[in-house]
Amino acid sequence: MKRNFLIPLIISFSFTNIISQQNVELVGSLNPNPGSHYSDIWGYTDEAGREYAILTGWDKVFIVDLNDPQNPALISSISVPGTVWHDVKTHGKYAYVVTDGGGDGMKIIDLSNLPNSASLVKTYNVDFLSAHNIFIEDGFAYVIGAGSVGGMFIYDLSDPVNPQLTSEYTHSNYIHDVYVYNDTVYAAAASTYDVVDVTDKSNPVKVSASAAIPGIYAHSGWMTEDKRYFFATDEFNVRDIIVYDLEDRTNWEVVLPSWQFPTGTRVHNLFIRGNYAHIAYYESGYVVLDIENPETPFIVGQYDTYPGEGDDFSGAWGAYPFLPSGLILVSDTNTGLYVLEFTPADPAPYIINNTDFDAVLNTDPVEISAQVFEKGIVTDVNAFYRTVINGNKGEWRLTEPESKSGDTYFFAIPGFDHLTTVEYYFAAADDSNQVTSLPPGGSGLDPAGVNPPGSYFSYQVILAGTPIITSFEPSAFDTTVIKPNPVHFLLEGVDTTDLDVTVKWYVNETFRINGKSFRYSSAFVQTPKIDTVKAVLTNGYKSVEKKWIVRVENPTSIEDGITITTFDLKQNYPNPFNPSTEINFSIAEVGFVNLSVYNIIGEKITELVKSEKSAGSYSVNFSADGLPSGIYLLRIEHPKFSKTIKMNLIK
């Protein structure tokens, strides 16, 4: 089926029933220091199976007993340097805390006396004071964003209160955070994500790096359970979550270029357990994604810990989904600890629009397609469309799938005339009679989605003609201007197919401005200077253009104090030309000048100059209207100078 359309827009997802508490219940909470700021969180389970939360605050670390999770109880608080950024991890019976922006090293906290108490046993500050994050894997601590270049220190924790430095890694950009599995580090390194081999802990080796993506900040990430896919988070709210396939760890293959929360809030930290990604999503709170298919994640849970608005960096900072009980720990920057329980529900079908485009450039039938995912059985999938002509909306029409490939359904919409807008949406139902539409808001069964949503996808049929230039200035296409004088350009036109037209102005192919007129300024150019001014009249699909040559010269009269000391006849410009060209010459002394054009057999065609001239530089325009294509000779004669050049007229 023939199709012609513009570049696809951002992938669209269907999110149904997204509310501040979805499939997540609040079990308990604790604000141990009201009015303070909180940062990261981690969990700990003692030998008896008793669970604890370790919450970092502005200037304290809080050890919280979760034996009664509905009533979390503070056991101990341990002082740390006052700052926004703290991170904590556990190893054996110890917790390790690092601080960024004014730290004093790594705090080592003894947890062996829980549930009675926890105590600081050491502050390790031999190699660094400030660090942003810490990760512990297989008895080694990876201290991140430390040292003079924000690199990675690796410590052997065989003696847990006396860490032994094995190496300092500095071959990536500033490292903000890492995920470590066995002997591989996945580093969030400013503009890229890097793989570092740490098989030899004394000699880390950089293996690969993702392509840099403009505008993002590589913040953190986590691997799926099968260690194939890396879910990366971008804290700058450009792409939020990017998914890479790292089956080959030397090749960062992007399989999902962007996933963003529907409200546009900023992502922070992400952790994966099973088929779910547990995310601290700042203002949107705690968010759970189903990632069974890593290329098509969708929301299955949310609890908003921060009901406020307007502060991108307030709300859920960290999450810990790894307690044996299944409870989820979340830290909120303003209100501290939340103990949550996530219960996966049977989700309704979810839909991805594969063919979201703006325009179709012919009257052929149009193919649209959508992917439909469902944990149960999909019982019905439809597309609905209607036309809008001159503001008049037609009736919704049902179109059933013409074919299916895997989870993708293909539909056909008939072709329509020029300037017809087509609105459409998708709908699907499952064996529990749950109905989803895309865009969201549709409802109804038999057929699924018979009640339309409030918004739709749309495209317009455009049979674009070529615009027509109706007037332009200056009429000569080769203009000489004396610095600092300007040149005023104007171009007007209409479209033959009722589309809006725009005039785009360029100087030497560099875009300058949109509009009917353009003022070329010679005040600040270096002379002599030759520029090309171009006007493009476009309807967005087809264009026509005009070009002008602008020559900028300094004043050349003797009265201006400039003396010409040489005779010269410059090559005409443009050359080849059609139908006119500019001729420049200079004479060093007053005298009679003859400037004539001859054909190739020596016959005089015209005399351009035949008079006495003072010393100076001159410019003459030669129009070859009425002359055939060919080589012409231009000759200048002066009592003390003569010269002949060739000019090539091509029509």
Image (cartoon, grey):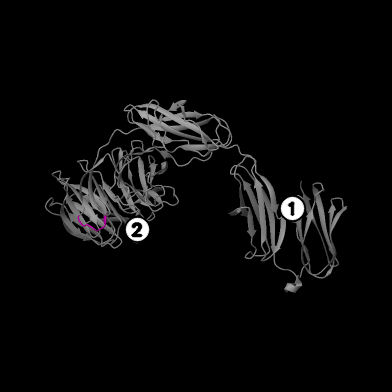
Amino acid carrying mark 2 in the image: Gly
Residue 37 shown in magenta: yes
Amino acid carrying mark 1 in the image: Asn
Label 2 crowd (10 A; few <14 / some 14-19 / many >=20): many
**C-alpha gap between disc 1 and disc 2:** 59 Å
579 or 476: nearer the eye? 476
- Residue 251 visible in the current orientation: no
Q: Quadrant of residue 14?
A: top left
- Please tell me whether the stretch drawn in magenta is mainly helix, strand or loop: loop
Which residue lies most toward the front here?
392
143 horizontally vs 446: left or right: left
User: Compared to 364, does 144 lie above or below?
Assistant: below
Of helix, strand and loop, which one carries label 1?
loop
Residue ID at (24%, 55%): 56
Q: Which mark is residue 150?
A: 2
Please state the horizontal and vertical placement of residue 345, each as a whole percent of the image.
28, 35
Identify residue for label 1.
Answer: 575
Q: Which residues are magenta?
A: 32-38
